[in-house]
Image (cartoon, rainbow, N blue to C red):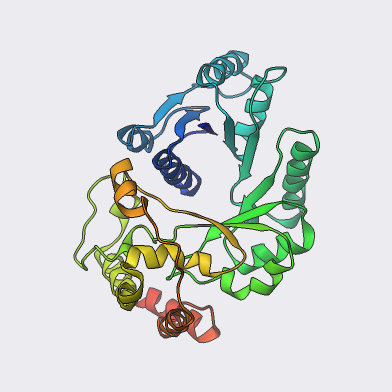
């Protein structure tokens, strides 16, 4: 399968990081993956290039740029994708305009950060999504969410097909506190960041340092790294029953019946083959899940009034 991701750029950010992780996972699964950047390539392009994923920039100018549409049309026709995955509105509109009256595969559009706007702007954004689906420009529409309030809004006020959110041993919320609501919603749930930037693989020591400027962890303080490693080590007991912390961390989101897909980030095909090439189908046991929940409570990973005040105090003290 040939997959093309269309983004505005690959400058460092949450959307861009997700696209990089998704592209690497898709390539490791046997797909031919390319990334087109509507404006410029950006700092994360080199990371994908090192993983064997082609990145091209359309170099669109600000404002209307008909030549950029023509270049985008040519790039997409040359790549002959089976699926085009556009990210956010600008990339999607340019894709549809460039490929108008041309034969193409399905276009999937993801809107990121939908929970960050006032309600009036949110309603307009969702109306744009509905119009895309209604006009046949996308078969399914979904958004990335961050917290329980986002889930409440989507379930109560929208007609989308799916959502994407962080789910990991160190991030049980917001999924765990909205399970019943999601079960009754009919929404597809895609979980990402299950390995928490790799720390839940159990391979990093407390004094680990990340010097590659393309690695988002290079901006982490020594204290943040040490704290994350200490938290991850609390789940080391899962190795006994699951074979490795990595497999346990990957299986954790799938322990929730509402999760349909887990996106796992990896830096190379060889790494993906060695870690995910053969994944046994067995899941976490009820006993393991109960112990996981106990550790999560001890680490105050659930959002309670007491945990919020302690986190604020820690930030004030610079811990």
Q: Position of residue 92 (x, y in %)?
A: 64, 33
Q: How many marks?
A: 0
Residue at left offset 46%, top offset 35% = 31
In the displayed structure, 278 sits above or below 59; it is below
Q: Residue furthest left?
A: 207
In the displayed structure, 307 sits above or below 151; it is below
Q: Position of residue 43 (x, y in %)?
A: 37, 36
Q: Position of residue 200 (x, y in %)?
A: 34, 65
Residue at left offset 33%, top offset 38% = 47
Residue 205 in view: yes
Quadrant for residue 186, please give it.
bottom right
76 left or right of 125 in image: left
In the displayed structure, 14 sits above or below 134; it is below
Q: In which quadrant of the rendered image does the C terminus lie? A: bottom left
In the displayed structure, 110 sits above or below 233; it is above
- Observer-nearest of 84 and 13: 84
Residue at left offset 33%, top offset 36% = 51
Residue at left offset 39%, top offset 73% = 315
Residue 200 in view: no
Q: Position of residue 277 (x, y in %)?
A: 36, 50
232 left or right of 37 in image: left
202 left or right of 149 in image: left
């Amino acid at each position: 399968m040939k997959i093309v991701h269309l983004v505005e750029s690959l400058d460092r950010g949450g959307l861009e990081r997700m696209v990089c992780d998704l592209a690497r996972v898709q390539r490791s699964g046997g797909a031919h993956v390319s990334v087109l950047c509507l404006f410029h390539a950006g700092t994360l392009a080199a990371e994908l290039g090192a993983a064997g994923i082609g990145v091209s920039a359309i170099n669109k100018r600000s404002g209307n740029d008909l030549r950029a549409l023509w270049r985008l049309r040519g790039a997409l026709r040359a790549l002959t994708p089976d699926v085009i995955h556009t990210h956010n509105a600008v990339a999607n509109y340019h894709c549809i305009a460039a490929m108008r009256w041309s034969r193409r595969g399905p276009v999937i559009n993801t809107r990121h950060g939908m929970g960050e706007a006032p309600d009036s702007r949110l309603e307009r954004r969702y109306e744009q999504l509905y119009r895309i689906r209604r006009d046949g420009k996308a078969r399914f529409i979904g958004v990335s969410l961050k917290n329980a309030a986002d889930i409440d809004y989507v379930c109560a006020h929208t007609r989308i097909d799916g959502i994407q959110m962080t789910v990991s041993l160190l991030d049980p919320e917001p999924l765990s506190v909205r399970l019943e609501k999601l079960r009754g919603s009919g929404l597809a749930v895609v979980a990402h960041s299950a390995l928490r930037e790799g720390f839940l693989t159990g391979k990093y020591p407390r004094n680990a340092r990340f010097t590659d400027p393309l690695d988002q962890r290079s901006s982490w303080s020594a204290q943040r790294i040490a704290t994350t490693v200490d938290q991850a080590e609390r789940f080391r007991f899962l190795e006994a029953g699951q074979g490795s912390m990595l497999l346990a961390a990957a299986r954790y989101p799938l322990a929730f019946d509402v999760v349909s897909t887990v996106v796992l980030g990896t830096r190379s095909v060889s790494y993906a083959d060695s870690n995910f090439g053969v994944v046994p189908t067995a899941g976490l046991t009820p006993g393991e899940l109960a112990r996981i929940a106990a550790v999560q409570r001890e680490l105050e990973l659930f959002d309670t009034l007491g945990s919020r005040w302690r986190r604020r105090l820690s930030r004030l003290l610079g811990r």
